[in-house]
Image: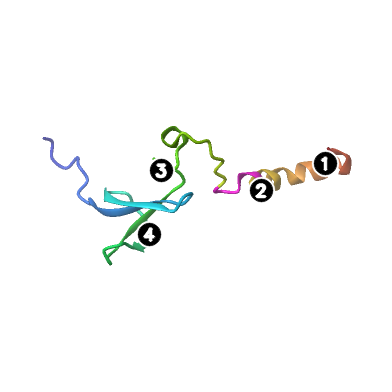
Amino acid sequence: MKKDIHPENYRLVVFKDISIDYAFLTKSTAETKETIKWEDGNEYPLVKLEISHKSHPFYTGKMKLIDTAGRVDKFRSKYKKHLDKKGPAATEE
């Protein structure tokens, strides 16, 4: 094998699906500044996920709307200036 091509900072990391509050512990090189206390009492680096195999519609068989970042609110705030320029008639439905 070639030398110095593989990362050497493998460590135990907790990945947490924030949409359903599911977490699992595995080895990774993912960088993170957050930590979490795990079930064994030790503290591990934490990587937050928006979706995992426990919440993905392909694996669960259920369609579920996940709006973790407030996408609708982001859209409204982004285009609020545009709608304000057109006047109140543009905002009526």
The reply to whether discs 2 and 3 touch (Cβ–Cβ < 8 Å) is no
Which of pointers 4 and 3 lies earlier in the amino acid sequence? 4
Q: Nearer the viewer, mark 4 or mark 1?
A: 1
Is residue 63 left or right of 3 when viewed as pictured? right
**Tag on residue 33?**
4
Helix, strand or loop at mark 3? loop
Residue marked by disc 3: 54
Which of pointers 1 and 2 lies earlier in the amino acid sequence? 2
Identity, as a three-letter code, of the amino acid under mark 2: Asp
x, y percent for residue 57? 47, 35
The answer to which quarter of the image holds residue 85 is top right
Few, some or many residues within 10 Å of mark 2 (<14, 14–19, 20+): few
Identity, as a three-letter code, of the amino acid under mark 1: Thr
Distance between the Cα atoms at labels 2 and 3?
A: 26 Å
Identity of the residue drawn at 19% across and 49% down = 8
Q: State the quadrant of the C terminus.
A: top right
Identity of the residue drawn at 66% across and 48% down = 73
Which of pointers 4 and 1 lies earlier in the amino acid sequence? 4
Which of pointers 2 and 3 lies earlier in the amino acid sequence? 3
Distance between the Cα atoms at labels 4 and 3?
A: 24 Å
**Tag on residue 73?**
2
Residue marked by disc 1: 91
x, y percent for residue 64? 54, 39
- Nearest to the observer: residue 31 or residue 63: 63
Residue range of the region highlighted in magenta in the rendering: 68-73
Q: State the quadrant of the N terminus.
A: top left
Distance between the Cα atoms at labels 3 and 1?
A: 39 Å
The reply to whether discs 4 and 3 touch (Cβ–Cβ < 8 Å) is no
Distance between the Cα atoms at labels 4 and 1?
A: 42 Å
Distance between the Cα atoms at labels 2 and 4?
A: 27 Å
